[in-house]
Image (cartoon, grey):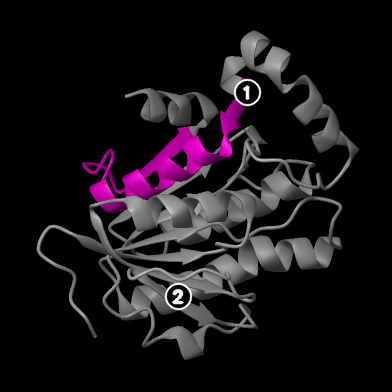
Amino acid sequence: MNVPPAGQRSIVIVGATGMVGGYVLRYALEAPAVARVTAIGRRKLGISHPKLTEVLHGDFADCSALAVTLSGQDAAVFCLGAYTGAVSDVELRAITVDYTVEFSRVLGGSSPGAAFSFLSGNGADPTGKSRIAFARYKGEAENALLAAGFPHVYLFRPAYIYPVEPRKEPNFSYRLLRAIYPAFRVLFPNQVIRADDLARAMVDAAVRGIGSEHHAVVFENRDIRALVAS
């Protein structure tokens, strides 16, 4: 195993083929504070970089095979997720909760001192009382991470994430939000965040220890914007 140079960090990214995860990968590869990047996912990234190690893993319901890969990691950024309506409720819970719990279990065993940045969502409900499944499941995943024993957990709860680059939107609501984004950003600035800005904040928190005096920090959309502006 290669040891990062003094002062630099080794980071693992889950979900780097997704919108936010893709920007997380780009930013981590460019960041001077990051020496090694391990990207774990189901599909190939199609890129190469001196810092990058790519690991294909097909079943996040069982991450036991990743124990060696996850050894010696300083930070993790977890962006794996699914859009509501794109999968069944059973699949949504499995992806949102079960995969997060299983990955954190193996990471905690291999790198117990790692910091963990988690892509949650606006309205995440740790009490489990919300009528919205997405909110309940994100809250459940947050609770599991807080109980996993990592020294620092950063929970990011963005509202509308602006894709920045053109893409095929997952549903009509996202097509509408993208169309009205210029006005929406002016009228409701704390209800939007650019995907690249969110990614930068997630990496910086995990690698540099934003709010490191606390075991856990929750960043609502307003807080994420403040991080980006600082």
Residues packed near mark 2 inside 10 Å, few (<14), some (14 to 19) or many (20 plus): many
Read off the residue under disc 1: 191
Report the mark closest to the observer, 2 or 1: 1
In this view, the residue farthest toward the top is 187
Q: CA distance from mark 2 to mark 1?
A: 32 Å
Q: Residue at x 63, y 76 (%)?
A: 42
The amino acid beneath tag 2 is Arg
**Position of the C terminus by quadrant:** top left
- What residue sits right under mark 2 in the picture? 105
Which badge, 2 or 1, is on the more N-terminal residue?
2
Q: Secondary structure at mark 2?
A: helix
The answer to whether the residues at label 2 and label 1 have Cβ atoms under 8 Å apart is no
Q: Any magenta on residue 210?
A: yes
Point out the stretch of residues depicted in magenta: 191-219
Please state which of residues 34 and 104 is positioned toward the viewer in this rendering.
34
Above or below: residue 166 compared with residue 193: below
